[in-house]
Amino acid sequence: MLRRIPESIVFICLSFLCSSLFACAQEKLSVHWEELTAPDFAKAIERSQGTCVLPFGILEKHGAHLPLGTDLLDVRYAVLHATEQEYAIVFPEYYFGQIFEARHEPGTVAYSSHLQLDLLQETTDEMARNGCKKIVIVNGHGGNEHLLPFFAQSQLQKRHDYIVYVFDERTPSTRGPVRKDSLDMHAGESETSKMMITRPDLAHLDRAGSESGADQHHVNLPDGVYTGIWWYARFPNHYSGDGSLATRELGKFQMDWWIDSIAKVIRVVKADANSLRLQNEFYEKAQHPLDTKQ
Ligand SMILES: [Zn+2]
């Protein structure tokens, strides 16, 4: 009896330890693609229900006061916090987007347009080959606003066994602390405020007024007429707004909104069974359009 009691206690302790270790191991599955071992990657695909996130940034000037990688730093901060709420695998640093309009500024990396599309296609193809059947591209860079919907549309060109979702919202529309910056389009109050949360050591507010982020109106064309030089014509310093108005309060409000919004998107995407079904139906019909009932 005296020998049995400790054994049963040991057994209970061991089972408790094992189950908590198991729970612990489950909790510790990283969301970072590059941090997972190969066997853990397979578990991560199962846990995420094949849902993976590609945070999309860029290397470009952000006024005289924010880092070149602002968009990538901010979007990864938001996605990594969102995936703590709703598990998904997060693809490593990706900054191969559209940024021709800032080629005149130091530190900008602008890949050719065909390379942007090819690299993105091969990246999502490779993600899907590894089990990511639902890929959420979370955009952190305004200059990608046409590239990403076009990329999503071009998935209908030929058959893919996965769906591309694009989430392209970074700033809440009305609620929260009142914004004072009327332009606020690039490196202005919102982006500077968010950097005060993401990497406060890289937000140099004292330099935000050293150049103008005002609209220069160098070209006046009617609404509906688009030219590639429109941005340079309005903001030749690649700065739009006034970063010196930034506050931590606004940054926290906007970042919390962004994190929650991404987490919601991931949840909705996981539950979405229709998009892939309809995409497959579409591919099938596209093989023989004359049979499609009018
Ligand atoms: Zn930016």
Image: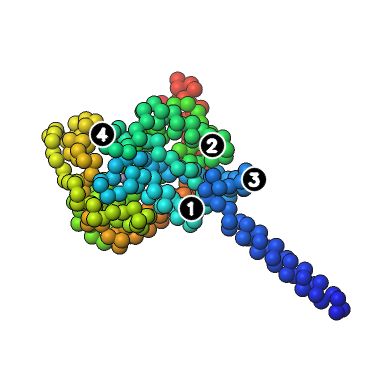
* Proximity of marks 2 and 1: CB atoms separated by less than 8 Å: no
Q: Nearer the viewer, residue 145 or 40?
A: 40
* Proximity of marks 3 and 1: CB atoms separated by less than 8 Å: no
Q: Residues within 10 Å of mark 1 (few under 14, many from 20)?
A: many
**Residue holding disc 2:** 128
Looking at marks 3 and 1 on the same chain, the residue that comes earlier in the sequence is marked by 3
Query: Can you say whether 30 is above or below 150 in the image?
Result: below
Relative horizontal placement of residue 131, taking residue 176 as reference (left or right):
right
Q: Residues within 10 Å of mark 3 (few under 14, many from 20)?
A: few
Whole-number angstrom distance, CA of label 3 to CA of label 2: 17 Å
Relative horizontal placement of residue 11, taking residue 34 as reference (left or right):
right
Query: What amino acid is at disc 4?
Result: His
Picture coordinates of residue 179, whole percent (x, y) = 23, 57
Query: What amino acid is at disc 1?
Result: Thr
Quadrant of the image occupied by residue 157: top left
Residue 39's tag is 3
* Secondary-structure class at tag 3: helix
Looking at marks 2 and 1 on the same chain, the residue that comes earlier in the sequence is marked by 1
Whole-number angstrom distance, CA of label 2 to CA of label 4: 36 Å
Residue at position x 29%, y 38% in the image: 106
**Residue holding disc 1:** 83
Whole-number angstrom distance, CA of label 3 to CA of label 4: 45 Å
Whole-number angstrom distance, CA of label 1 to CA of label 4: 36 Å
Whole-number angstrom distance, CA of label 3 to CA of label 1: 20 Å
Residue at position x 86%, y 76% in the image: 3
**Residue holding disc 4:** 104
Q: Is mark 3 within 8 Å of ligand 1?
A: no
Looking at marks 2 and 4 on the same chain, the residue that comes earlier in the sequence is marked by 4
Picture coordinates of residue 129, whole percent (x, y) = 56, 35
Q: For the C terminus, which image quadrant?
A: top left
Quarter of image, ligand 1: top left
Q: Is mark 2 within 8 Å of ligand 1?
A: no
